[in-house]
Amino acid sequence: MKFKLWPRTLVVQLITVTAAAVVLSNLAVAYWFEKGNELQNEASLNERLLDRASTVLTTLRAIPPGSRPVVMKTMSSRLWQFTEVPRAAFKPQPMSEQEAHLAQRLIAVLPPRAQKAPIIVQLHQKPADIVPDQLPTGGDRNSEAIRFVVPLDRNTYLSAVFLRVPAQWPVEILVAALTAIMLASTAAALMARRVVRPLYELTAAASLVARGGSAPPVEEKGPDDVRNAAIAFNRMTEKVSRTMEAQRHLLSAVGHDLRTPITAMRINLEFIEDYELRHRLQSNLDELQELTEQVLSAARGTGGEGKRSVDLSALVESLVADLDDMGEPVTWQNHSPAPVSCRPNEIRRAVRNLVENAVAYGSRANVQITDNGVVYEIVVEDEGPGIPEDDRQRVFEPFVRLESSRNNATGGTGLGLTLVKAIAEGHGGGVVLENREHGGLRVRMILPRVQLAAQ
């Protein structure tokens, strides 16, 4: 399951995970600390409350009844309120285990004659449930109250009410957590940068190689895993470059070696008197000659011509005009000047291959140029059957022809689209095949407006 808001870059992911881990760990520590501190403070508070209540009770029992109101008023404060109330106003109430334990401890400090009277301890009393005259004058009335009800004499009880102080936010822990998050996130960012920077270089080099370029060796640095990936990539690109170069040399050698016997056979054809035989042999030699030239073009690839600035629109229009003069069913849609730096002979060869394919397999070719501000697209459309989706990548492979007769007149040499793809990628672009909605094939040859350095 993928989360839509989950960051996609390694740097942000590492910072997010580190920050989340620090937050969770600080929350756990803060909870554990506050819980322990709360229990410790609760125990300390209960001890102080017991001591205060027993002290006030002892004092009140030692003075005349008429002086008790003055003493209770003096001993009261914003959080404490001592009140003398009739014994009949209280009834024994069930207490929790903790409250009963505190009641027993309070009984232990009372005189023997007072230990027989019921004692009430309420640790979580709501202030709203207490008579207003028995509540302290200050404090937060929304907080809990702690109440002790102990016998003062035979007819009265002492009500001691204490209002809890609201718990404060652990500011120190929050500041420490924020500091830890900032430090951990900074450390994670620095570490991620050390890891990601070589990966960025590796990605850029791989993209350059994928476009048909020759990438310089990637710097072998960073952690062992990243450095090993860079080492493996450098070895791979070096081996691929050697293999591709060997293939180019092989194709070039084969193509050049074929030219000599083809020329000799053409000379020998002149001595054949049988016209039909000579015509068939001539056709075979023409097919072999075309295949040889295509092999040599494939061997030269995209590196034999220098780049220069041209008007792509004028280049394609002149090609279409030449084909139209030759009687080919080709139409051109006018386009404004399209300046681009390219190898014009290669672009002309690629577009010619696309147009000839469209005429051969789709009856006619409609050519136009589109511009979206980033790339130019040379679009060639035909009215043929199109290409099945499963075959759209296979047709770019050398010598692959979907036409099964192997006839040069209908199936070509199988190198046309291979050259088109090599030329487009050599310019930093690509080729896309797609079937038109109402029949026919659309080929889009993509050329970036801003070209990379010549490879």
Image (cartoon, grey):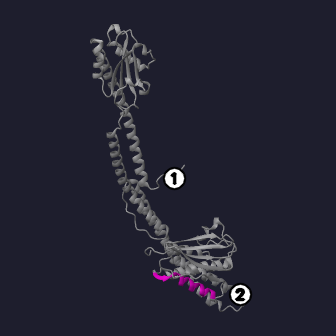
Kindly state the secondary structure of the residue where label 1 is placed.
loop
Q: Is residue 184 above or below residue 445?
A: above
Q: Position of residue 32 (x, y in %)?
A: 38, 34
Q: Position of residue 284 (x, y in %)?
A: 66, 83
Viewed as shown, does residue 380 lie left or right of 42? Answer: right
Mark 1 vs mark 2: in front: 1
Residue 277, label in figure: 2
Q: Quadrant of the C terminus?
A: bottom left
| Residue type beneath disc 1 | Lys
| Residue type beneath disc 2 | Leu
Residue 4, label in figure: 1
Viewed as shown, does residue 260 lie left or right of 7? Answer: right
Mark 1, Cα crowd under 10 Å, few <14 / some 14-19 / many 20+, is few
Residue 411, label in figure: none
Viewed as shown, does residue 70 lie left or right of 86? Answer: left
The part of the chain drawn in magenta is 308-324
Q: Report the residue that reaches farthest toward the top.
A: 113
Q: Is residue 166 above or below residue 243?
A: above
In this rendering, does residue 254 appear at all?
Answer: no
Kindly state the secondary structure of the residue where label 2 is placed.
helix
